Image (tube, rainbow, N blue to C red):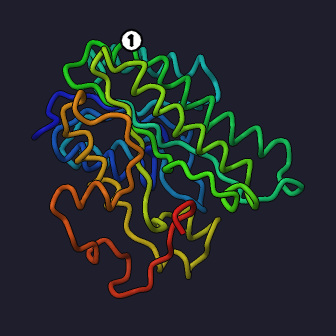
């Protein structure tokens, strides 16, 4: 029960990668704040903050489901206040919530551009900003952001520039926080998958059944996140990790068990293909 009594604030934890990370931490005793705006189930995506909280409790952790649209600062402040009121402190923030539109410049509507930047950049910044005063009081504080390694190859900007810069902004903020809060012992790292991940969004919105079947289970990111968060915060900070990189350092050399369908040809993830 490595994380017994430790509290993690996870955005977008009602489903997919965020929920997988939450369940992994909960199985090791953590308190999980499920901060997301899914209070009613979207049939394309499944799951709500309440169903996720039930699964977290069943996994062995304590859960607090808080409706929170990270585009709205007052809702973030309320969620953080509730976290402290219920659990008494905060040991980690996991910036998982994100919006995506893989569209070119002329095809990216203003509202989609704004949505990606409001959630991916502004929302991530505000959540982290309001959590930091409480992370400073933790004995092993971590910021973990789901964003990619930086790569300035023009191909990553040519076809979906708006999305790319929104995700790269998350990674650049991570590098900045690692340096800015180094003296406080707060770790700031990013994590990104080598392959596509089998989530409802991949299957029903982004890639269809074929890509879904060529993906890995979300548990690979959960295991990688667990490994990062288990480390002493002063020793592991300022990294833009990939999932395989983290797990190889833990002695894992075979990733076949993470494939949704054993033996399938895996689809490389965006930014790493």
Residue positioned 19% across, 40% down in the render: 230
Left or right: residue 160 versus residue 219 is right
User: What residue is shown with label 1?
Assistant: 133
Residue at the extreme front of the image, as rendered: 153
Question: Residue at position x 62%, y 51% from top?
Answer: 152
Residue 268 x/y as whole percent: 50, 71
Residue located 81% across and 42% down the image:
111
Measured as percent of width and height from the top left, residue 84 is found at 34, 15
Q: Quadrant of the C terminus?
A: bottom right
For mark 1, give the secondary structure.
helix
Residues 129 and 7: in front is 129
Q: Where is residue 9 in the image (x, y as percent from the top left)?
A: 38, 31
Left or right placement of residue 27 versus residue 69 in this view: left
Q: Quick check: 88 above or below 32?
A: above
Left or right: where does residue 61 sit relative to residue 149? left
Residue 32, given in percent of the width and then of the height, sits at: 31, 35
- The number of numbered discs placed on residues in the rendered structure image is 1
Query: In which quadrant will I find the N terminus?
Result: top left
Above/below status of 24 relative to 67: below
Choose between 70 and 37: the one closer to the eye.
70
Q: In this view, does 77 lie to the left or right of 241?
A: right
Q: Which image quadrant for residue 211?
A: bottom right
Q: Residue furthest left?
A: 1
Q: Residue at x 48, y 27 (%)?
A: 176
> Compared to 165, does 84 lie above or below?
above
The residue lying furthest to the bottom in this view is: 263
How many C-alpha atoms fall within 10 Å of the one at disc 1: few (<14), some, or many (≥20)? few
């Amino acid at each position: 029960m490595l994380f017994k009594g430790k509290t993690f604030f996870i955005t977008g934890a009602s489903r997919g990668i965020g929920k997988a990370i939450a369940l992994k931490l909960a199985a090791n005793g953590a308190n999980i704040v499920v901060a997301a705006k899914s209070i009613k189930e979207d049939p394309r995506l499944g799951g709500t903050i309440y169903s996720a909280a039930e699964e977290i409790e069943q996994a062995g952790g304590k859960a607090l489901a808080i409706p929170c649209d990270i585009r709205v600062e007052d809702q973030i402040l309320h969620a953080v206040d509730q976290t402290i009121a219920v659990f008494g402190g905060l040991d980690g923030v996991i910036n998982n919530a994100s919006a995506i539109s893989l569209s070119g410049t002329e095809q990216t509507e203003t509202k989609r551009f704004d949505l990606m930047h409001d959630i991916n950049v502004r929302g991530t910044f505000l959540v982290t900003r309001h959590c930091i005063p409480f992370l400073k009081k933790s004995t092993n504080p971590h910021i973990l952001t789901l964003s990619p390694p930086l790569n300035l190859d023009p191909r990553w900007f040519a076809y979906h520039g708006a999305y790319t810069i929104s995700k790269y902004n998350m990674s650049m903020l991570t590098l900045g926080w690692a340096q800015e809060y180094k003296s406080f012992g707060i770790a700031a790292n990013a994590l990104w998958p080598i392959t596509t991940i089998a989530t409802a969004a991949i299957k029903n919105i982004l890639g269809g059944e074929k890509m879904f079947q060529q993906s890995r289970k979300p548990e690979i990111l959960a295991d990688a996140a667990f490994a990062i968060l288990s480390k002493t915060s002063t020793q592991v900070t300022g990294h833009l990790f990939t999932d395989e990189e983290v797990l190889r350092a833990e002695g894992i050399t075979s990733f076949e068990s993470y494939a949704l369908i054993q033996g399938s040809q895996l689809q490389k993830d965006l930014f790493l293909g």
